[in-house]
Image (cartoon, rainbow, N blue to C red):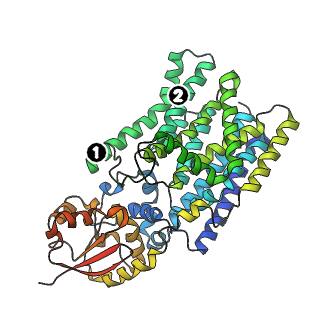
Amino acid sequence: MIIPSARRAVPGLLAVVGAIGGAGAAWHYADLGLTLSHYDARGHLVVARRIFDSLTPGWQQIGAVWLPLPHLLNALPVQIDPFYRTGASAIAISIASFAIATAAIGWIVLLITESASAALAGAAVFALNPNVLYLQATPMTEPLLITLTTVAVGLLIAGSRGAGWAFALACLTRYEAWPVTGAAMAAAVWTQRRSGQTWRVAIAEVRAVALYPAVAIVAFSIFSRAVVGKWFVGTDFFVPENKALGDPILAAREIGWGARELSGPGLLAIGAAGAAAAAVVGLAVRERARALMALSLMSTAAIPWAAFFKGHPFRIRYMIPLIAVQAVGAGVLAGIARWRPVRMAAVIAVVAVTAYELEPLDAKAPMVVEAQWDRPNVPVRARVTACLGSPEGGATIMASMGSLGHYMQEASRSGFTIRHFLHEGNGDLWLAALDNPRPFVEWILIEEKAQGGDMLARRSREHPTFLEGYSRVCEGAGLALYKRAKG
């Protein structure tokens, strides 16, 4: 597909504007003290840091519940204490991801509609969303996921073999990329078939691209097996409490409700109408069959749907990747018409609804509100940290990283590093301490309330002798701190 030079400049322009706007939003949220307010934002910094900063440093510290790419990208920068304590290096990755994703969304719309104005309108639906703007101002991993999936889909539409590498990287970032990759490969086979290829040739062409993400997924599964003894970590890291447990319809409704809350009913309707238009055109018009590939971005809903169906607590953050396909759909709806006056009217309508429903720095945006759930607990936990005294004594603290990773990052403000903590990632050392902690740790830190208590809380309930020789010295915000008795 040939795009005039003026249109080719659109993605570059969007990337520049996105980088400037993203940096400005990041500065705004940092000024409000919200950069690390989400507990997972701190948790991602801990996983990246512990690869080198650990009682047992090494490749095993990369982890196997969260996918590795975001932590590998940030592993070296967060060894610098200011970057670790503020999240600055991870935020820089998020801002860059936001800028590239904004450009990629515009590029996808441009490839499908050949309309620069529609590309700009679609990108605006994504870039002006306050939930997206907040998330790209944090160390969270969704911005990198959205970037890699949109770039991969754009490359696939453009017919570039580089799509395979992009899909592979996306599949090593977040699990939502796995169904997107499968859907995109299926759409690519259909597109090849519509272009006149036989099914055999079409499958062979796409297989050459699909090989890269397939290898990435297999490699991660082998890594997971080596680290935690499972090919894939499923549902044993949360307490099933969602009302959609076992109800597929209710799980789907929760996703629909979340998508509407994140943007508004108008933009949701426009995005859905645009996705439907892309499907119709992709199926009916041979020259536009590639439009179907863009709809693969909708598959990010598969992972939260499955999670809610299995009882995972509702998190509106899981629906944010859907804003990318909503933006593409809005852009397609704006630019699909061939008659220029109709196209311009549609662009104006999309821009008007975007301006009406989105307030870019809305303090009450659902993602901003959700990110602050844990904020009141931070000063209370600081009092527990004060009970630990100075980290210079070198005493080791036993704590579950699965439940208290965010606390470990908070404690860095008082000088504590990951090496001060004995956690699940320390393998045999951790297992030995579970059996008898007294020879290994002076302190035991237990989360007693969240999700019914962490694994140390369960251990103390099931094995009353676990805390023998320790006395409770501090508590707050669900944390209980125990100190080993002398002698």
Distance CA(mark 2)–CA(mark 1): 28 Å
- Residue 61: give x, y in percent of width and height: 32, 57
Q: Position of residue 421 (x, y in %)?
A: 29, 70
Badge 2 crowding class, 10 Å Cα cut-off, few under 14, some 14 to 19, many 20 or more, is some
Identify the residue at horizontal 18%, vertical 72% (top origin): 467
**What residue does disc 1 label?**
230
Left or right position of 266 against 30: right
Q: Nearer the viewer, residue 446 or 218?
A: 446
- Is the residue marked by circle 1 packed among few (<14), some (14-19), or many (20+) residues within 10 Å? some
The answer to whether residue 401 is left or right of residue 337 is: left
Residue furthest to the right:
341
Asked which secondary structure carries label 2, the reply is helix
Label placed on residue 186: 2
The C terminus sits in image quarter: bottom left
Q: Which mark is residue 410?
A: none
Q: Quadrant of residue 355?
A: bottom right
- Frontmost residue, 105 versus 207: 105
In this view, 11 is above or below 438 = above
Q: Amino acid at mark 2?
A: Ala
